[in-house]
Amino acid sequence: MKPDAVRGHLDGLLLAVLEPGPLHGYAIIAAVQERSGGALELRTGTIYPALQRLERLGLLSSSWESTGERRRRCYALTEAGQRTLAGERTAWSEFTAAIGSVLNPAAPPNTSAGLAT
């Protein structure tokens, strides 16, 4: 899939993979890749600025977690993030329905129904 396909939807993707619980950056990348069946591959240079922006907006919170001698930042959805995710899902449904109705128009109604033969 083209990297540009994610543009405009990155926030929703990040919020959605954090819905079940906190994750660190690489786990977020892996979750998006797994949930998309490998179709979406996010780069660290893409997600970390987005995660920091979402945290500044109050949609995510973060904390440092230690694993052995290593420290990593874990991100979690806030209540505001949950509300925003709900809005993202609604917007996505409306968007895909509109695009789908153009790309796959419904079959024209059967005009011969009810005609006498």
Image (cartoon, rainbow, N blue to C red):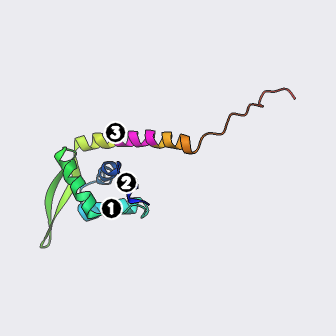
Front-most of 2 and 29? 2
Q: Main secondary structure of the magenta part?
A: helix
Q: Secondary structure at mark 1?
A: loop
Position of 86 with respect to 66 (left or right) is: right
Identified by mark 2, the residue type is Val
Q: Residues within 10 Å of mark 3 (few under 14, many from 20)?
A: few
Q: Amino acid at mark 1?
A: Leu
Q: Residue at x 19, y 44 (%)?
A: 57
Estimate the spatial distance between the alpha carbons at disc 1 and disc 3, rounded to whole Å: 22 Å
- Residue 31 vs 58, above or below: the answer is below
Residue 65, image x and y in percent? 15, 62
What segment carries the magenta color?
A: 87-95
Mark 2: few/some/many CA within 10 Å (<14, 14-19, 20+):
some
The answer to whether 8 appears left or right of 68 in the picture is: right
Q: Nearer the viewer, mark 1 or mark 3?
A: 1
Most foreground residue, 45 or 114: 45
Residue at which label 1 appears: 42
Q: Amino acid at mark 3?
A: Gly
Comparing marks 2 and 3, which lies closer to the viewer? 2
Q: Is residue 37 magenta?
A: no
In percent of the image, x 72 and y 34: which residue is there?
A: 110
Q: Are marks 1 and 3 in contact (CB under 8 Å)?
A: no
Q: Are marks 2 and 3 in contact (CB under 8 Å)?
A: no
Look at 87% across and 29% down and name the residue there: 117
* Residue that badge 2 annotates: 6
Identify the mark nearer the N-term, 1 or 3: 1
Residue 87's tag is 3
Of mark 1 and mark 2, the one earlier in the sequence is: 2
Picture residue at 30% right of the left edge, 53% below the top: 14
